[in-house]
Image (tube, rainbow, N blue to C red):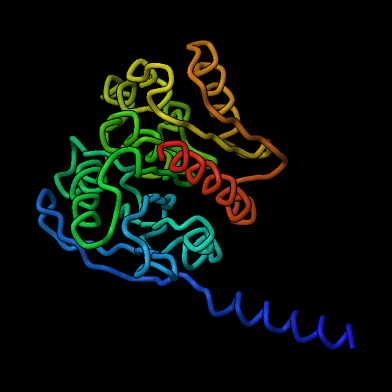
Amino acid sequence: MKKHVFFFLSIFLTVSASLQASVIDTVETYSAVMKMKIKAVVVRPDNYETLKEMPVVYLLHGYGDGYDGWLKKGNGFQKAADQYNIMIVCPDGARGSWYWDSPVDEKFKYETYVSKELVSFVDSKYKTIKDRKGRAITGLSMGGHGALYLALKHQDVFGAAGSMSGGVDIRPFPNNWDMAKRLGTYAEQPDRWEKNTVINMLHLLTPNSLSIIIDCGTDDFFFKVNENLHQQLMYRNIPHDYITRPGGHSWPYWKNAVQYQMLFMSNFFGAGK
């Protein structure tokens, strides 16, 4: 008899778990600064209608992907919406914007788009906490750079920031990933490269002004620059979480890493209550 009860209980729990699933919206936003429509993915918890307001994590994609990159390649991250009662927004970074406002190309103003226009859109359409205490941003690779870059420059918008395998120092890679198209070449515009790389922006921080988590695999080609960033943060006495483990620049690593990022963000949101 006990075996039968356990069997039916197992089925009940499995069915119940499957019934609770986050709601995924694909929305079309408008960027006034770039004068074009841009899509984004918005993940809401299953119990969205019962909640008053909730925090938001902006999750940025890497080079070569778009707004749906996380859904196509990192499917499973959206479970965090139900687990932590948060919203997750995946912006579009135009394959290779690096989330800068490009001084070279007027069609690439993704710093303004993500940190101002998209945040304003999400806050106007959804039940969000409209304060930096309820906003976090993270991403992988190009998106890891972008998340820290945007959070450092807009600490009034984001209260927590993370990076997974982030390109946190762009200078060792002057010929890669369309960065020269966004900034000009390093040889001709070295000042732009110096000012727009994360590792050179730490002077914008004061201790405890921004909650930070950094994660990079030891086999990643960005590992050295992440290790350097970690050392610089420690030298400046800036609190942060730093995670390394075996792994490379790959989706198996990021699908694992994003779980740590979401837990970190949830703890940040909880600390503000």
Q: Nearer the viewer, residue 197 or 10?
A: 10
Residue shown at the point (32%, 59%) measured from the top left: 52
Residue shown at the point (60%, 32%) measured from the top left: 223
Query: Looking at the figure, which quarter contains the C terminus?
Result: top left
Residue shown at the point (35%, 44%) measured from the top left: 134
- Occupied quadrant, residue 204: top left
Q: Is residue 237 left or right of residue 25?
A: right
Q: Is residue 238 visible?
A: yes
Q: Is residue 184 visible?
A: no
Q: Is residue 195 left or right of residue 263?
A: left
Q: Nearer the viewer, residue 133 or 224?
A: 133
Residue shown at the point (30%, 22%) measured from the top left: 195
Q: Nearer the viewer, residue 191 or 237?
A: 237
Query: In x, y percent, where is residue 136?
Result: 39, 43
Query: In x, y percent, where is residue 4?
Result: 85, 88
Relative vertical location of residue 5 with respect to residue 50 in this rendering, above or below? below
- Occupied quadrant, residue 210: top left
